[in-house]
Amino acid sequence: MRNLGKKNSVTKTIKGKRGFTLIELIIVIAIVVALVAMFLPLALNKIDESNVTRAKADVDALATAVTSFFSSLGNFPSCDGADCNPLNDAANNLRFLAVGTGTGDLSTVYPADSGALWSLTTQDDGTVPARNNAFNHLAMNNPNANATPNEATTDYVTTRWKGPYISKLSEDPWGAAYIVHIGSMQNSGCPVGSTGAPPACTAPATGRQGWILSAGPNGNLDTAPTATTLSADDIGYIFFTQ
């Protein structure tokens, strides 16, 4: 009888417990939704600011790497031929470097180019697109992207190439390759694709500005190679002009 009495007591206690009413649940949900609506835009804005800050830092690092390369070799990393040592005009025909994660062909992560300002897929090396991978020029001495880096008579002058000039390469925060426009300068002092000697060089096909660019949050290159200012949400700057 004692045990039964205790059981009845426990049962009464459980039945006496009160849960949330529907109105109370609605109020709680409304408060949660209001808080989310209030703080989510702030959180997303902070993420956007962080991505822009990272892209700017990456552009600075790439500019430093390219400048260091120039200090070592006396030219920008523009060799796209089979003989870069010594550099000659015939081999020095690279238009731009694509910067992304790892080695190989980065054409799948080129930024969009809705206005055909850059024509990236027709300006890279049609046979071995990997030759324009910045990794092959800045992180290792293998501009022709073959299986053997530091070839004495093929790659950049091995006694002058002092790389790696950058320790980490990556795509921009929105998943597109950075574009380093080195096609406006070659070892002779004239733009790639031009003739003559400076200052009487013919105009190059891709312009005279040396841009380093991220296509920004919209993933599209809005700044033309010949532009002197950034357009839309592109991130970067001219690191040299000719």
Image (cartoon, rainbow, N blue to C red):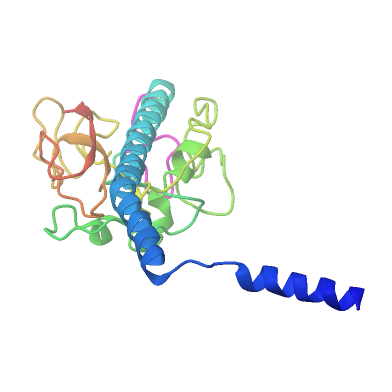
* Prevalent SS, magenta region: loop
Quadrant of the rendered structure where residue 73 is?
A: top left
Tell whether position 84 is magenta: yes
Q: Nearer the viewer, residue 133 or 230?
A: 230
Q: Nearer the viewer, residue 16 or 145?
A: 16
Q: Position of residue 154 (x, y in %)?
A: 49, 43
Q: Magenta stretch: give its range.
A: 74-88
Q: Is there any visible trace of residue 139 in the rendered image?
A: yes
For the point 91% across and 73% down, the residue is 2
For the point 15% across and 41% down, the residue is 194
State whether residue 106 is above or below residue 39. below
Q: Is residue 87 left or right of residue 149?
A: left
State whether residue 46 is above or below residue 198. below
Quadrant of the rendered structure where residue 201 is?
A: top left
State whether residue 74 is above or below residue 228. above
Q: Is residue 9 left or right of residue 185?
A: right
Placement of the N terminus among the 4 image quadrants: bottom right
State whether residue 57 is above or below residue 96. above
For the point 53% across and 68% down, the residue is 19
Q: Nearer the viewer, residue 18 or 154?
A: 18
Placement of the C terminus among the 4 image quadrants: top left
Q: Is there any visible trace of residue 78 in the rendered image?
A: no
Q: Position of residue 150 (x, y in %)?
A: 57, 39
Quadrant of the rendered structure where residue 147 is?
A: bottom right
Q: Position of residue 21 (x, y in %)?
A: 43, 69
The count of marks equals 0
Residue that sits furthest to the front in the current view: 1
For the point 15% across and 46% down, the residue is 206
Tell whether position 200 is magenta: no
Residue that sits furthest to the top in the current view: 71
Q: Position of residue 167 (x, y in %)?
A: 53, 34
